[in-house]
Amino acid sequence: MADKTGIEWTDATWNPIRGCSRVSEGCRNCYAEGVAKRFSGPGMPYEGLIAKGGQWNGKVRVVESAFDQPLRWVKPRRIFVNSMSDLFHEDVPFDVIAMIFSIMSVTTRHTYQILTKRPERMLAFFEWACDGLDYPFRIAEAWPPGLEWKPAGGGRGGYDNCGPNWPYENVWLGVSVEDQATADARIPLLLEAPAAVRWISAEPLLGPVNLPFVNFWCSVCGGTGMLGRFPGGACTRCAGRGEIPAISTDPRLGMPSTPMRRIDWVVAGGESGPKARPMHPEWAGVLRDQCVGAGVPFLFKQWGEWAPRGPAVMGYPSVEGVLRIRLTDLGENGSDLGAEGDNHAWMQRIGNKAAGRLLDGVLHDAYPGVANV
């Protein structure tokens, strides 16, 4: 955990869980895995959590000594929860997740940003926490044993309240997506989660993502489908049809008086690190345009290792003596025989710092307010 971080969209990180495992292509060059590998020796924080090949070994460890960190932070800040892991990893016990939510629920001076690649387990946790009620009573009863319970005041930290509204207004739930397939699989589940703010992190962005057609809602069965586009348009839960944008405020089909849950914030960025893959400019640009059209705050985090090769007027310098690639809009090397895709873009590997954060010459740095729950 750190009170300062280089992550552009947050102020601090809090890691009460260590360890993870890969679940999709976006995990291939995981930065957290690389950091953990460096600190996995005897007596070090990530000892026993990294396999011989340098990957996560699937084990997780609860760091109880980190539980009180948000209480000790007096100044309000945005906190990225488990920047080095996934809070909803399958081996993190529900009662531990409940303790973490209990701490977040009473430190309302902070805003907590949670990202997961496991939204199905996130939903299972909330079902367990509520156990048939409309309030997660198991979170309210889950204060960590031995953690001092004291009110905030005197500049010494502590809790802010003991009866917050539900969903917690200071907890933002999000999913990581890297392409259309992961967006189709994860975003509909996110939209079912009880959250004041729902957001996505499209980083590393490895392919195009079309948000307006990612969510499927059937007016007959009332269910949200697992995918955005079913073969033939058929719902997996019944024979009904219906498709609604994930970033629209339009009411649901057949329920004109019921506002639709939607994505409230989109973060996008390219991959960093020594094995980074380039992001086609069109992928980020389309996400930006979709968000602008729907009135959804958009934050462009970074180009990553690779940036467009010109024009300079858009903030894309042409650097000599660096690796280049002619990238298609399907993410393939356009110089290869038989490469699929169109709209070739010349990309250059100039490093994360030099590549910067400008998208078509503009810094996109928007954040959400409290959304429709």
Image: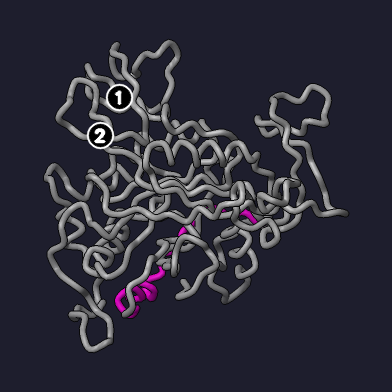
Amino acid type of disc 1? Trp
Image coords of residue 129 (percent x, y)? 21, 50
According to the image, label 1 marks what residue?
A: 217
The answer to if 199 sits in the magenta stretch is: no
Rendered-image quadrant of the C terminus? top left
Q: Residue at coordinates 34% horizontally, 50% vertically from top-left?
A: 173
Q: Could you say which is closer to the camera, residue 154 or residue 365?
A: 365
Q: Mark 2 or 1, which is nearer the eye? A: 2
The answer to if 58 sits in the magenta stretch is: yes
Kindly identify which numbered label has been placed on residue 146. none
Q: Which of the 4 image quarters holds residue 369?
A: bottom left
Q: Which residues are magenta?
A: 54-73
Q: Could you say which is closer to the camera, residue 99 or residue 113?
A: 113
Q: Residue at coordinates 44% horizontally, 33% vertically from top-left?
A: 211
Asked if 39 appears above or below 357 in the picture, the reply is: below
Image coords of residue 367 (percent x, y)? 39, 55
Give the secondary structure at mark 1.
Answer: loop
Q: Which of the 4 image quarters holds residue 257?
A: top left
N-terminal label among 2 and 1 = 1
Give the secondary structure at mark 2.
Answer: loop
Q: Relative to residue 217, is residue 32 drawn left or right?
A: right
Instruction: Give the farthest residue toward the right.
Output: 321
According to the image, label 2 marks what residue?
A: 260
